[in-house]
Image (cartoon, rainbow, N blue to C red):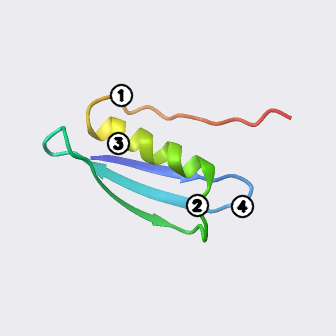
Amino acid sequence: MAPATVDAGICGFATRIQAASPDMQTVQITYESDCPHVTCPLYCGFLKAIEVAAGMALPKDATISIDK
């Protein structure tokens, strides 16, 4: 299982993702989100959780930084 939390940034909304792949081929996703709309970082979090659950990536934090 690959749990992930996505902090969308300035809005303060968070999404909690659970990804599991018992057969290492099909990934099942569940999530809870405070966000009333879909935000860009959310998709990255889903993809990272899927990769980890399927054994395609190591479980390490990823970061998006905005340079001003």
Q: Of the residues shown, which amino acid type is indicated by label 3?
A: Ile
Question: Measured from the top left, where is residue 18 in percent x and y?
Answer: 35, 54
Residue at which label 1 appears: 58
Name which of mark 1 and mark 2 comes first in the sequence: 2
Judge the density around disc 4: few (<14), some (14-19), many (≥20) Cα neighbours within 10 Å: few
Name which of mark 2 and mark 4 comes first in the sequence: 4
Judge the density around disc 2: few (<14), some (14-19), many (≥20) Cα neighbours within 10 Å: few
Against 38, is 66 above or below? above
To which quarter of the image does residue 64 belong? top right
Q: Of the residues shown, which amino acid type is indicated by label 2?
A: Val
Question: Measured from the top left, where is residue 20 in percent x and y?
Answer: 25, 49
Residue at which label 3 appears: 50
Considering the numbered disc 3 on the image, is that residue within a helix, a strand or a loop?
helix
Q: Of the residues shown, which amino acid type is indicated by label 1?
A: Leu
Q: CA distance from mark 2 to mark 3?
A: 18 Å
Question: Measured from the top left, where is residue 25 in percent x and y?
Answer: 19, 39
Residue at which label 4 appears: 11
Q: Of the residues shown, which amino acid type is indicated by label 4?
A: Cys
Residue at which label 2 appears: 38
Q: CA distance from mark 3 to mark 4?
A: 25 Å
Considering the numbered disc 1 on the image, is that residue within a helix, a strand or a loop?
loop
Name which of mark 1 and mark 4 comes first in the sequence: 4
State which quarter of the image contains the C terminus.
Answer: top right
Tell me if label 3 and label 4 are in contact, CB under 8 Å.
no
Considering the numbered disc 2 on the image, is that residue within a helix, a strand or a loop?
loop
Question: Residue 23 or 34: which is nearer the viewer?
Answer: 23
